[in-house]
Amino acid sequence: MSAHDCVLGDNIVMANCATLAGHVQLGDWVHMGGLSAATSILQDRAHAFIANNTAVTRDRAAVRHGGRQPAEPHSVNAEGMRRRGFTAEQIRNVRNAFSHPVSV
């Protein structure tokens, strides 16, 4: 399941054959679908959902990852956020931030 020096949050779900490389950090309530993988030195923030058969190679926020290789953000994990008690306004704010990213 996990390799060396990984930090796992609470209430994580890892389906069959979900794997982690070294130094991966998963936040609370992260869900990893079957045959998914997270590469070294990666952080997946709380409430992220990683689709089955997806390779995550970059840090991610609380978004749903599509089944592309490498993974691309697909949408906000609104259902997971609702289940964890986020308000409709909070979810809307996250959706707005996701659809209008700020350039640095």
Image (tube, rainbow, N blue to C red):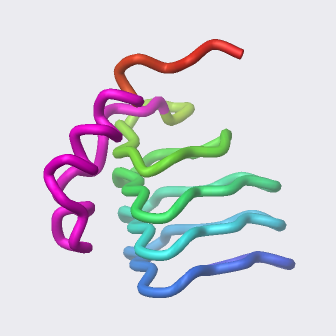
Q: Position of residue 61 (x, y in %)?
A: 51, 47
| Above-or-below relation of 82 to 17 | above
- Seen from the viewer's position, the closer of residues 49 and 17 is 49
Q: Quadrant of residue 40?
A: bottom right
The extreme bottom residue here reads: 10
**97 left or right, relative to 18:** left
Vertical relation: 72 (above or below) 78: above
Tell which of 24 and 96 is nearer to you. 96
| Residue 65 found in image quarter | top left
Determine which quarter of the picture holds residue 68. Answer: top left
Give the left or right position of residue 49, taking residue 25 as reference: left
61 or 22, which lies in front?
61
Left or right, residue 16 beside residue 58 = left
How far across and how far down the image is residue 79, in percent? 17, 57
Q: Please identify the quadrant where the N terminus is shown.
A: bottom right
Is residue 46 positioned above or below 91 on the image? below
Q: Which residue is found at the position 43% from the left and 51% from the top?
A: 62
Boundaries of the magenta span? 72-97
Q: Does the magenta-highlighted stretch encompass residue 34? A: no
Residue at left offset 68%, top offset 56%:
43
Q: How many marks?
A: 0
Q: Residue at x 35, y 51 (%)?
A: 51
Residue 15 place in picture, x, y as percent: 38, 74
View extreme (top): residue: 103
Whether the magenta-drawn stretch holds residue 86 is answered as: yes
Q: Residue furthest front?
A: 89
In this rendering, would 57 be left or right of 22?
A: left
Q: Give x and y (percent) for residue 38.
A: 63, 56
Residue shown at the point (56%, 32%) measured from the top left = 70
By secondary structure, the bulk of the magenta-drawn segment is best described as helix
101 relative to 42, above or below: above
Quadrant in which the C terminus is drawn: top right
